[in-house]
Image: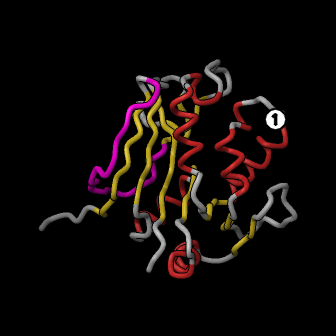
Amino acid sequence: MTATYTFDVFSSLDGYGSYAGDGDWGGYWGKQGPELLDHRFASFGTETRMVFGATTFRQFVDMMAASSEGDDVRDPWVTRMRNSPATVISSTLEGPFDWPDATVASGNAIDIVTRLKEESDVPLRSHGSLSLNWALMAAGLVDRVQMTIFPVITGRLGTDPVLGGAGDFDLELLEHRTLDGNIQELIYRPTLHVYGG
C-alpha cells in the first residue's frame, strides 16, 4: 500500500504564509488558542515521516536554535514534529543537524517522494516547503492539502504566497473544522485541472 502524503500549511485569509518583519502579530499571527494547539498536538500523535525542502528545514533548525522553552516555536506539537523521522530533499545541505532523526536525500524530489510513498510504513507529511510541494502536487504525489487559515489579511505585509507557484487544481473537501472560534482547517484532495474536455 502506498503511504499518503499531506502538504500541511498555515495561511492568512489572503493566502500568505508569512509577513514582513515590521509586522507585530508574532507566531500564528497571534491568533492561536488552546483548540488549535491541542489539535495540532493530536495530529502529530501517530507516527509520521516528515518531508522538507532545504530552505524550510534550515528555517526550522534556525528557529529552534534561536528559541527558548516557552516560546511559540517550541509548542508541544512542534516538538512532536521535530522528533519525527525526517527526510530533507537537498543537494546542498550537509549534516550534522540539530534535529534528532533527519536524513538528507539528494536527487530529483519527485523520484525521492515516489520512492518514499512506495516504501514508507507510515504517512508522509510536509509542513511548509512551498516550492517542493508545488512540484509534488503537479506530479500527482500530494494526496491531501491541509490548510489552516488564520483570521487575518496581510495585504500590505504578506510574503510567501502559499499557493502562488502551484498549478491549477480541482479540490475535493475531505474534512473541515473551526478551531478557537475563528481559525479554519480545511483538508482537500487535489486533482490537477485538465483543460478543454
Bounds of the magenta segment: 162-180
Judging by the rendered image, the residue that carries numbered circle 1 is: 67
Give the residue furthest to the right: 96
Q: Is residue 168 magenta?
A: yes
Left or right of 78? Residue 99 is right
Give the residue furthest to the left: 197
Q: Is residue 176 magenta?
A: yes
Mark 1 is on which residue type? Ser
Residue at the spot 33% in from the left edge and 58% down from the top edge = 189
**Residue 151 in picture, x, y percent from top left:** 44, 24
**Residue 109 in picture, x, y percent from top left:** 57, 72
Q: Is residue 10 above or below residue 25?
A: below
Residue at the spot 58% in from the left edge and 34% down from the top edge = 37
- All told, the count of numbered labels is 1
Q: Quadrant of the C terminus?
A: bottom left
Left or right of 31? Residue 79 is right
Element type where label 1 sits in the image: loop
